[in-house]
Amino acid sequence: MTLNAISTEKNYPDLPWISLESVNDVEAWLDLYDRELQQLAGKNPQAGYGVCFTLLHGGEVYLHTNSDGDILLDVTPDAAWVTPVLTAVTQVSPPRGQIWLVPGQVLMQLILGLNSLIATSRLVVQHEYRIVKR
């Protein structure tokens, strides 16, 4: 874990990533991921629940959806190399820091765009996104 990505997450096992070949594969993965997170959260879901992707060429991307349906991405400094991919698949300009706010409707494209770059994934609870409060 880098110093810039503060985390109090519980440790869940890293699972090898299985390449998703189609929109149907992504939908099935999202459904499974959502059900597993709901089981972990129970009746009291909290901010910080999501998934962490460990990338093949270094770094991690934490993904969380907020109550508005938008996507928060915490891209660790070691994963900064993935910025051009994130920009291309989300059509969102890179943020000043490491936290991206992405419209929820690009989730499918995001997963497909990162698909070949992911080494492992794991469920995460209690990840503290480094959002500067103003």
Image (spheres, rainbow, N blue to C red):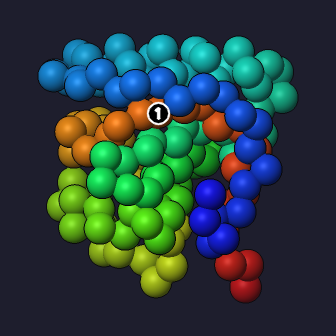
- Residue 36 locus on image (x, y percent): 61, 17
Toward the viewer: 58 or 45? 58
Residue type, mark 1 in image:
Ser
Residue 75 in view (yes/no): yes
Mark 1, other Cα within 10 Å: few <14 / some 14–19 / many ≥20: many
Query: In the displayed image of the protein, which residue is found farthest to the right?
Result: 44
Q: Is residue 64 above or below residue 95?
A: above
Q: Residue at x 30, y 54 (%)?
A: 57
- Residue 65 locus on image (x, y percent): 55, 44
Name the quarter where the N terminus is drawn.
bottom right
Residue assigned mark 1: 121
Q: Is residue 87 above or below residue 41?
A: below
Q: Residue at x 25, y 37 (%)?
A: 115
Q: Residue at x 60, y 47 (%)?
A: 66
Toward the viewer: 119 or 92? 119
Residue 69 in view (yes/no): no
Could you tell whether 61 is left or right of 116 in the image?
A: right
Toward the viewer: 129 or 101? 129
- Residue 42 locus on image (x, y percent): 79, 19
Name the quarter where the C terminus is drawn.
bottom right
Q: For residue 116, which quarter of the picture?
A: top left
Could you tell whether 34 is left or right of 58 in the image?
A: right
Q: Residue at x 40, y 25 (%)?
A: 16
Q: Is residue 88 above or below residue 26?
A: below
- Residue 13 locus on image (x, y percent): 60, 26
